[in-house]
Image: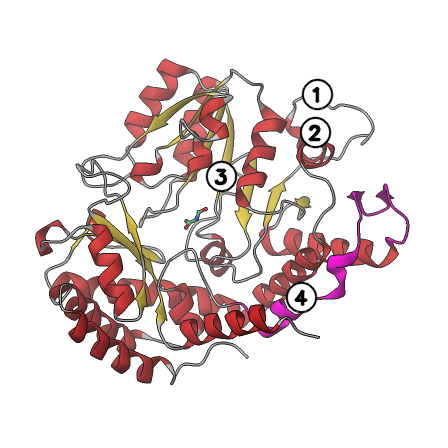
């Protein structure tokens, strides 16, 4: 029998999503097939280890599930090895550090406050606590500054560069980062959590074949369940032997870092849902989806610019944009709150060299993956830009925002969630 309290809350959340516009760029609406696998009986099975090499009996079915997920990941991204067990992005990144460097080693990544991620070396995160982290920023316009990154690498000699972003609206030059890593003999890892769906669609260059290890969460532009994968090339060595840290041994290094290094049993329901999402991403329609995400983001950014908004880097090449709200006379937190009252969910975000605190920064971050899943195209982006401008202009007027919410709900219901 259902837990009515929880079920009621789940229904409320479904209604909230359906009656508004989800524009947090790291979120999406997964398919019913993905959610069905995610809510399946596979949640009940323990299977520490890997297919064919488990510490539990009764794994003959989950072995097949995990092999399907791994094979689809390998096919989709063109790698020889995929680990689909990380419970989410942060554990996946922990595994990469654990596999490649030792506590106290110097690691380098993009500052969270300039568009990186906590696990790329933030001082209060494990990555900045157990390792000596050095953090690069952007230039004053918000672009990655490869010369400055190279200079920092030459000075600091990191053993690992963890490259990737969570709030960067432009293309990342993997080749330049490779050259920088090679110049100091560092490992190079790519965190493509935000852009993996765009990589699959050919909208953003793939780091595969350029970097040593690539990781992605599975629930952002890739549109799967919450989870993560680590992708690399190489030959798995004897799993019982501790491998040397060589490129050839990357598969074993990564697998051993996940288990026994960091995790216990994989979440088999999550693995199954990842497999379903990967099959969806292998279909030609997914490429169209990924392309439309970027088309929508570009259109939305142009419409916002024409309404006097200031965008970090002046626009976007991918799925997201960061708006500096300073010239509109409100903070990122006020912007987030006002938009939320109007039924548009975004998140407050720092802008490069933000004079304000991360708890109430100058900007907001928003993107188009979820709206694109609901079938919205360029025409709808014009309407969305109008509403964003309206809500920002009337951010102190709760009555106006409530009326806007009603209007947005009528519109949103024309674009149902996947069912
Ligand atoms: N929390 C994710 C994001 O919103 O970008 C990154 O982990």
x and y percentages locating residue 195 in the rendered image:
44, 52
> Which labelled disc corresponds to residue 342?
none
- Relative to residue 73, is residue 26 drawn left or right? left
Please identify the quarter of the rendering in which residue 351 is found: top left
Query: Are circles 4 and 2 on residues that touch, CB within 8 Å?
Result: no
Q: Residue at x 62, y 47 (%)?
A: 87
How far apart in space, not on screen, are marks 4 and 3 (Cα)?
30 Å
For the residues bearing labels 2 and 1, Cβ distance under 8 angstroms: yes
Which numbered marker is on residue 249?
A: 2
First of labels 4, 1 by sequence position: 4
* Residue at horizontal 65 percent and vertical 39 percent from the top: 233
- The residue labelled by disc 3 is 190
Q: Is residue 162 left or right of residue 144?
A: right
Q: Would residue 194 appear left or right of 354 to someone viewing this image? A: right
The magenta stretch is 30-59
Q: Nearer the viewer, residue 172 or 306?
A: 306
Q: Which comes before the other along the chain, label 4 or label 2?
A: 4
CA separation in Å, label 2 and label 1: 7 Å
Sooner in the amino-acid sequence: mark 2 or mark 1 = 1
Q: How far apart are the two marked residues, 2 and 3, measured between alpha carbons?
A: 18 Å
Residue 159 within the segment the image draws in magenta = no
Q: Count residues near mark 1 (Cα–Cα under 10 Å), then give few for <14, some for 14-19, many for 20+.
A: few
Q: Which residue is disc 1 drawn over?
A: 244
Q: Nearer the viewer, mark 4 or mark 3?
A: 4
**Mark 4 or mark 3: whose residue is earlier in sequence:** 4
In depth, the one of 414 and 359 nearer the eye is: 359
Q: Which residue is mark 4?
A: 39
Give the mark nearest the N terminus, 2 or 3: 3
């Amino acid at each position: 029998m259902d837990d009515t309290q929880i079920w009621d809350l789940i229904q409320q959340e479904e209604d909230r999503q359906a009656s508004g516009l989800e524009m947090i760029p790291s979120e999406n609406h997964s398919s019913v097939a993905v959610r069905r696998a995610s809510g399946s009986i596979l949640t009940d099975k323990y299977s520490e280890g890997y297919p064919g090499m488990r510490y539990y009996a009764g794994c003959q079915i989950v072995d097949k599930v995990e092999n399907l997920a791994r094979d689809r990941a390998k096919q989709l991204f063109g790698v020889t090895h995929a680990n689909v067990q990380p419970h989410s992005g942060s554990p996946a990144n922990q595994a990469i550090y654990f596999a490649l460097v030792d506590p106290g080693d110097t690691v380098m990544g993009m500052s969270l406050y300039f568009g990186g991620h906590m696990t790329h070396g933030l001082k209060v995160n494990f990555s900045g606590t157990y390792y000596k982290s050095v953090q690069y920023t952007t230039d004053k316009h918000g672009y990655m500054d490869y010369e400055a990154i190279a200079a920092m690498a030459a000075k600091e000699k990191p053993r690992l560069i963890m490259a990737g972003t969570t709030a960067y609206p432009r293309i990342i030059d993997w080749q330049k980062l490779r050259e920088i890593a090679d110049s100091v003999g560092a490992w190079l890892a790519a965190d493509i959590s935000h852009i993996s769906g765009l990589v699959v669609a050919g909208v953003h260059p793939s780091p595969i074949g350029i970097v040593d290890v690539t990781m992605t969460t599975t629930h952002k532009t890739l549109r799967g369940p919450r989870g993560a994968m680590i992708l690399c090339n190489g030959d798995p060595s004897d799993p019982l032997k501790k491998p040397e840290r060589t490129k050839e041994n990357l598969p074993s290094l990564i697998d051993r870092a996940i288990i026994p290094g960091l995790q216990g049993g994989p979440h088999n329901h999550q693995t199954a849902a990842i497999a379903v999402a990967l099959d969806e991403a292998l279909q030609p329609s997914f490429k169209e989806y990924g392309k439309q995400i970027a088309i929508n983001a570009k259109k939305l950014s142009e419409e916002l610019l024409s309404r006097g908004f200031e965008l970090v880097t002046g626009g976007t090449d991918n799925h997201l944009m960061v708006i500096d709200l300073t010239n509109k006379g409100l903070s990122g937190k006020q912007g987030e709150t006002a938009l939320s009252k109007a039924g548009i969910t975004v998140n407050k975000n720092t802008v490069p060299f933000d004079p304000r605190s991360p708890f109430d920064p100058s900007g907001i971050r928003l993107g188009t993956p979820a709206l694109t899943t609901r079938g919205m195209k360029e025409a709808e982006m014009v309407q969305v830009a109008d509403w964003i401008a309206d809500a920002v202009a009337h951010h102190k007027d709760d009555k106006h925002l409530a009326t806007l919410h009603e209007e947005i709900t009528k519109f949103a219901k024309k674009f149902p969630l996947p069912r």
